[in-house]
Amino acid sequence: LAQIKEVAPTPDSVYMKGLDTFKAGDMPAARETFSSFLEKYPQHDLAANAHYWIGETHYSEKSYEPAILAFQDVIKNYPTKDKVPAAMLKQAMAFNAINDTKSAKYVLKKLGEAFPKSDEASKAKELLKEIN
């Protein structure tokens, strides 16, 4: 019998495991997977996305303050990545959830100015109407 070789996890496989775990609804395990991804591969192309998904795990658990901080990591540290508009939108939603409407409005307006053609910008416009 051929011996089964243990395959070392690739950055992509670790990231996908985190995403699958998130979709399965296990937020602490997903967060752990994304955190270990970031420890091992901090410069990887998917690092911004991993930070974003860490924010999503907190958000779905209604831990809005840690979510705001995780989304801020994406916005501040990966300004050129395409996850930034999504991070800004979710950050504004988290601010709104903790009744910080001033911060929520500020982030939504910035999102509309910085990424006017994004899907998130049109969602931001809708959300601004609801918050006012």
Image: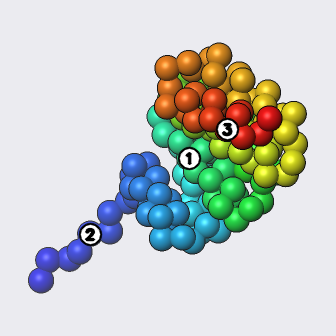
Q: Do callouts 1 and 2 mark residues in contact (Cβ within 8 Å)? A: no
Circle 1 crowding by C-alpha within 10 Å: few under 14, some 14–19, many from 20: many
Q: Report if the CB atoms under discs 3 and 1 are less than 8 Å apart.
A: no
Secondary element type, mark 1: helix
Badge 2 amino acid: Lys
At horizontal 12% and vertical 83% (from top left) the residue drawn is: 1
Q: Amino acid at mark 3?
A: Leu
Which one is in front, 52 or 4? 52
Badge nearest the viewer, 3 or 1? 3
Cα distance in 3D space between marks 3 and 2: 51 Å
| Residue found at x 77% / y 59% | 63
N-term-proximal mark, 1 vs 2: 2
Residue drawn 43% across and 48% down? Answer: 11
Q: Position of residue 72 (x, y in %)?
A: 73, 36
Residue 119 badge: none
**Residue of label 1:** 50
Quick check: 10 left or right of 90?
A: left
Which dot, 1 or 2, sits closer to the camera? Answer: 1
Is 7 rendered above or below residue 3?
Answer: above
Query: Which x, y percent locates residue 67?
Result: 73, 50
Instruction: From the image, tell me which residue sits under label 3.
Output: 127
Instruction: Answer above or below: position of 46 versus 54.
Output: above
Q: Quadrant of residue 20?
A: bottom left
Circle 3 — which element? helix
Q: Amino acid at mark 1?
A: Ala
Q: SS of the residue at dot 2?
A: loop
Give percent across and percent down for residue 2.
Answer: 14, 77
Residue with the mark numbered 2: 5
Residue 105 located left or right of residue 30: right
Choose the circle earlier in sequence order: 3 or 2.
2
